[in-house]
Image: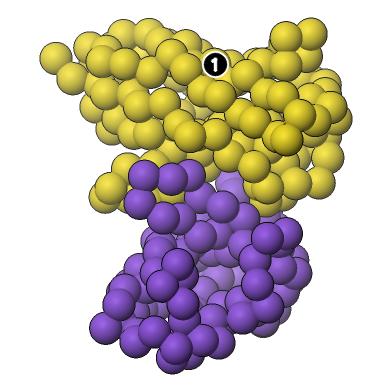
Amino acid sequence: EIVMTQSPATLSVSPGERATLSCRASQSVGSDLAWYQQKPGQAPRLLISGASTRATGFPARFSGSGSGTEFTLTISSLQSEDFALYYCQQYMDWPLTFGGGTRVEIK
Amino acid sequence: EVQLLESGGGLVQPGGSLRLSCVASGFTFSSYSMTWVRQTPGTGLEWVSTISGSGGTTFYADSVKGRLTISRDNSKNTVYLQFYSLRAEDTALYYCAKDRVGPIGGHDFDYWGQGTLVTVSS
């Protein structure tokens, strides 16, 4: 099983600042990596696929990068609506696995 | 507009059975694999099971293998998750999710339902 590790668990950021979230895979997943955003009381929402392709409806301040085992989600200038939980997921191999999540909170 | 609506959750005793349903609309259902993902506060998101668009191929997490069956009825645009022997650790919010790519499965998920809560307790 490919283990996905996200860091940090919680990220405290001021509005307007940059946020950098990390996701590490225990073995290479190529670019088969997705990011999801989840707000309280809501289902996860696909944010990034293929490690770097932004999903419909998300602004350009969200960007994904990386390949192999190291991935990054960057939010260039945090807005109030961006404070949420973020999960990564690999789909290189079965079982599909998720990281433990990073909570982005207001500093 | 794509919509996924889960139902069937509830309070069940350990060892009990339960069937979850997810009705889909807004896309050609048989052209996409469907997946169940569960979420608990303590363990985050966990992939549970996937079924191909035709229903002919299924995948299960080791934690549930042998205790549940995923199935679909493409004439009703519905995917099911049938539990046979529930355990306390199955307590979670269960989401159904649509594969982003197509009928084979093994990708990410571009649409999710709002979830149905399963609580296993005596």
**Residue A90: x %, y % from top left:** 62, 59
**Residue B96: x %, y % from top left:** 56, 32
Which residue is located at x 64 percent, y 42 percent?
Answer: B111
Q: How is the image coloured?
A: by chain
Q: The chain drawn purple is chain what?
A: A
- Spot the residue most to the left: B122
Q: Is residue B4 visible?
A: yes
Q: Is residue A103 left or right of residue A55?
A: left
**Residue A18: x %, y % from top left:** 48, 90
Count of labels shown?
Answer: 1
Q: Is residue A63 left or right of residue A23?
A: right
Instruction: Count residues near mark 1 (Cα–Cα under 10 Å), then give few for <14, some for 14-19, many for 20+.
Output: many
**Colour displayed for chain B in the image of the structure:** yellow
The answer to which quarter of the image holds residue A91 is bottom right
Q: Which residue is mark 1?
A: B21
Tell which of B15 and B30 is nearer to you: B30
Which residue is located at x 44 percent, y 38 percent?
Answer: B38
Per the image, label 1 sits on a secondary structure element best described as strand
**Residue B101: x %, y % from top left:** 81, 46
Q: Is residue B72 left or right of residue B69?
A: right
Q: Which amino acid, by three-letter code, is at mark 1?
A: Ser
Q: Is residue A71 visible?
A: no
Quadrant in the picture for the C terminus of chain B: top left
